[in-house]
Amino acid sequence: MNTAAFGISVGPLQYYWTRAHTVAFYAEVADSAADIVYLGETVCSRRHELRAPDWLDLARDLRGAGKTVVLSGRTLIESGAEAAALRKLCDQREFMVEAGELGAVRHLAGRAFVAGPHLNAYHGGTLQWLASRGAARFVAPLELDAASLARLLRERPAGLQCEVMVWGRMALAYSARCFTARHHGLKKDDCGFRCIEHPDGLDMRTRESRDFLAINGVQVQSGACLDLTGQAQALADMGVEVLRVSPQSEGTLQAVAALHERRLGRPAGPAEPPAGMPRCNGYYHGQAGIFLSEDAS
């Protein structure tokens, strides 16, 4: 039986890394098997190790290395300055944009874009509407189980590609409050940029000391690293065109390599997340997200 091919993407960096760490990471991405790379600050406008011109320079370097580059916009817009920055991102014509919220869809004014995972595209009607506004690809909501994803793929309009995140910590919620600043007893606007001390977010545990969630600025994330690399071919055969790896401080390039091996039809083991971070894939199997099934189907 012929199996479907799939592309590999590296999603936008969710964490606040040093400039040196970020540049070194994307130099490795340039040499990897990834086909698509998403760039830009999507979490907090106060982060300033890289600014918009720096992201554009990285985008051009990666394009020169043969990658398709997409610039990602913020998911939560809270000020006039952030709205102006989003409008400027959408006005540039050099790279496609991933719309993190509906304001970006409006600013793009019908030009082709990627609909991000937090646009709440849960049924065919929403996908029809996004496609009518220019969406060329949508990133499926992170908590969909396999059956719901298959139904959504059947309902999508012709020509609209689907991308599914298969590795990395999942962003589950956003808030106007900065959880990291609050953890450190600081105000959001005087946070000391403490996120830079937590390159994979800040772990939260239950009273029983069980890994539960992670906080990353205004994000609440899964405490565990999503790992659907074992389901890569099943997702492609279902009709998913692109599989996304979300950057972590360790293991990201190994996850890309594992996916590449699988699309070549060769066996590959799980990509290990940073030390101490468990893996999960429960949503895909219709269970609590924190659950891990080793079933590779």
Image (cartoon, helix red, strand yellow):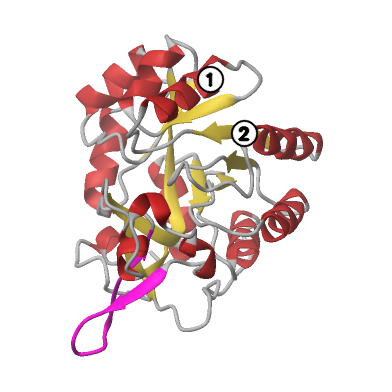
Q: Which mark is residue 88?
A: 1
Which residue was labeled with disc 2?
52
Relative vertical location of residue 109 with respect to residue 180 in this rendering, above or below: above
Q: Position of residue 89 (x, y in %)?
A: 53, 24
Q: Position of residue 31 (x, y in %)?
A: 78, 53
Relative vertical location of residue 132 with respect to residue 160 in this rendering, above or below: above
Left or right: 212, with 5 as reference point: left
Whether residue 217 is visible here, answered yes or no, is yes
Q: Is residue 209 magenta?
A: yes
Residue lying at 40% horizontally and 78% vertically, measured from the top left: 278
Helix, strand or loop for the magenta stretch, by majority: strand
Relative vertical location of residue 102 with respect to residue 260 in this rendering, above or below: above
Q: Amino acid at mark 1?
A: Lys
Whether residue 218 is visible here, answered yes or no, is no
Q: Which residues fall within the magenta stretch? A: 202-216
Q: Position of residue 246 (x, y in %)?
A: 50, 55
Judged from the image, the secondary structure of the residue bearing numbered disc 1 is helix
Q: Position of residue 83 (x, y in %)?
A: 40, 25
